[in-house]
Image: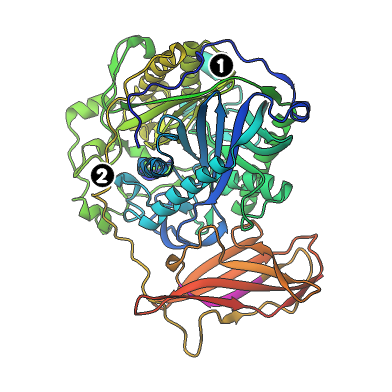
Amino acid sequence: MSLSRRAVLARSVVGSATLAAAAAVPAMSGPLGAAAAADPGAGGYEIGVGLSDITGPAAECGMMGYSQLEQQTAGIHLRPRARAFIIGHGGQRVVFVVADNGMIFQSVHHGVLAELARRFGDRYTEQNVLLTSTHSHATCGGSSNDYAYNLSILGFQQQVYDAEVDGIVAAIVAADADLGPGSLALGRGELHNASVNRSRVAWELNPVADKQHFPAAIDPAVTALSLVKGGRQVGAITWFATHNTSMTNENRLISSDNKGYASFAYEHIEHGVRYLDGAPDFVAAFAQTNPGDMSPNLNLRPGSGPTEDEFENTRIIGERQYAASKAALAQARSMSGPVDSMLCYIDLADIAVDGRFTPDGQPKRTAPAAAGVSLVAGSVEDGPGLPGAPIPEGVRNPFLQALGGHDAPVPAWLADAQAPKAIAAPLGLLPPVPWVPNVLPIQLVRLGELYLAAAGGEFTITSGLRVRRAVAAALGVPLQQVLLQGYANAYHEYVTTPEEYDAQQYEGASTLFGRYTLCAYQQEFARLATAFAARQAVPRGPAPRDVSNLQPNFQPGAGPDTLPPGRSFGDVLTQPAPAYAPGAQVAAEFVSAHPKHNIRRNGTFLEVQRRQASGEWVRVANEGEWAVKFFWSKRGTAESVARFTWDIPADATPGRYRFQHYADSLSPDGALHPFTGTTNDFQVG
């Protein structure tokens, strides 16, 4: 992000800690299949899974991740979703959510917790709810209340915020309703052809002992958790470090990218999940860990590697993660042990770091946020930033003008504190309030023998390793039992090691709180883990800010729709051909309306239908699935055209098919009018 890219609150933090976190490692026994068959409730867990759509407006909404003003949504390919898992044991519960979006911003974290409190009271709070993101760069932006992350979006977007909050809450509600006895199994493996180190120059500055942990300069670890109820697998969570940037900054279609495809392959292709057919019977999430310097673009160019086609790259990198998950779970062993969690807040802009956690053994401090010059260029391996402008588009950006510009002086003390960073923008000192959050949550979650150290940054593989070591030492458990869970509960860009920071590559320039940011994290996670292990309360820490009342928006809205002369909404402008062979692509165009009028969350803009022998038309595919693409375009000032393509499966059932398009038009009086458009039918096979 470059600037916007890679670029009811609980009482005092107690953490349930039903058993000391440093207790002996729970025994693991028996392969997954045997454990599930022998006792569906083995392990004494209660398990629930849920899934919901979080897709925002499919037209004229800035996309989150690459900080390109011109990258606005213009259709949908693979709908982003929120996947929720509730795991309970011994009276304690943990909620774990993986959202197919750019980041979990503090605004969304706060909104989800507030709604959970309204629905459930104190059952689910900041203490036992962990929200994470896959970090797709092909989804809607604007859900943040932080100005730096809304610059290229042109402000806060209520529709996007609502879609994310409502979708995450709906997934959690579904998981709560799904709770029942179950068991867990944990598998591990490695994946070596789905990531490459995009910042090798910086990584090479790390000590030999760190580099020896990653012989290929990547983190190949795959950790997979299987959730079983009634002898049947109902869910899987897979952690692997690679950026979710197979789709480039030239793309305009909403997509959950490679991790979204991995979920789609597991859920839809293997388990037959149909996302419009009610509650799924299987949910698979592909979570991040510490992918700050890990790229899926294996040739170190955007959209390149293993092929030169961004859609194929998305599929292949996703398929490799899916296959790695399956391989890990094939060796999984059932596990037991407590479920627990603990969260507190820290002020990353002002932490005194003890010399035990610094490279030279001397006390250090973090500093208010500042963006380095290299941040502006973006990561050239995944998608360059904005050339020639330290802040997107300079004075041509009305959002920036509303904030009073960005030319605040850089005081000498901040330059010294951030050295050797060359500061492009002192984000923590800009008016009217700091443009990024500095009071941020850290959280520890225990799921049996697996521990998640969760924070809101993009940790490089080596910075993640050091946090894991600090937590494992404090808990007294083996290193492999601790994962760094990035993109969690908030977002503040990168965390590099001090050595990597000195290179001031993109990731170092994006480490906003200075050279000792990681050292502060090591110290604070060690403090939290020590309390966690000893069953001691820790103070909640400083209160996170709420600036939701200071959110300008300069993104044009969608006004009344207009029609071409002699046309009606839903008319077919381009009909399919009369017949197609399996493997061919069908295309059709409709007179449509602006997608912002009805974003159709948990719905679709298109059904591909097949005629039954009875004459009834049944849905066989829909927009939001891999084989269907929706392209929106505008003609004139307010005429919308919806173009759909369907890649016919090679094993498609022969017969008569048609497209049916759904949307809502807005009339000048402000009323919405649903309409349907239907193509001629066509023969397949």
Q: Which of these two is toward me, 337 or 547?
A: 337
User: In which quadrant is the N terminus drawn?
Assistant: top left
Judge whether 670 appears above or below 303 on screen: below
Q: Which residues are magenta?
A: 587-593
What is the distance, in whole Å, between disc 2 and disc 1 at their CAs?
39 Å
* Res. 660 visible in picture: yes
Q: Which of these two is toward me, 148 or 335?
A: 335
Residue lying at 21% horizontally and 50% vertically, measured from the top left = 403
Residue 120 placement, left or right of 178: left
Residue lying at 67% horizontally and 62% vertically, measured from the top left = 621
Q: Residues within 10 Å of mark 1 (few under 14, many from 20)?
A: some
Mark number for residue 479?
A: 1
For the stretch drawn in magenta, the main secondary structure is strand
Pointer 2 with pointer 1, Cβ within 8 A: no
Indicate whether residue 591 is drawn in magenta.
yes
Q: Position of residue 681 (x, y in %)?
A: 71, 78
Residue 54 placement, left or right of 40: left
Q: Residues within 10 Å of mark 2 (few under 14, many from 20)?
A: few
Residue 681 placement, left or right of 573: right
Give whichever of discs 2 and 1 has the lower sequence position: 1
Tell me the kind of residue under disc 2. Answer: Val
* Residue assigned mark 2: 547
Element carrying mark 1: helix
Judge whether 388 appears above or below 533 on screen: below
Q: Quadrant of residue 623?
A: bottom right
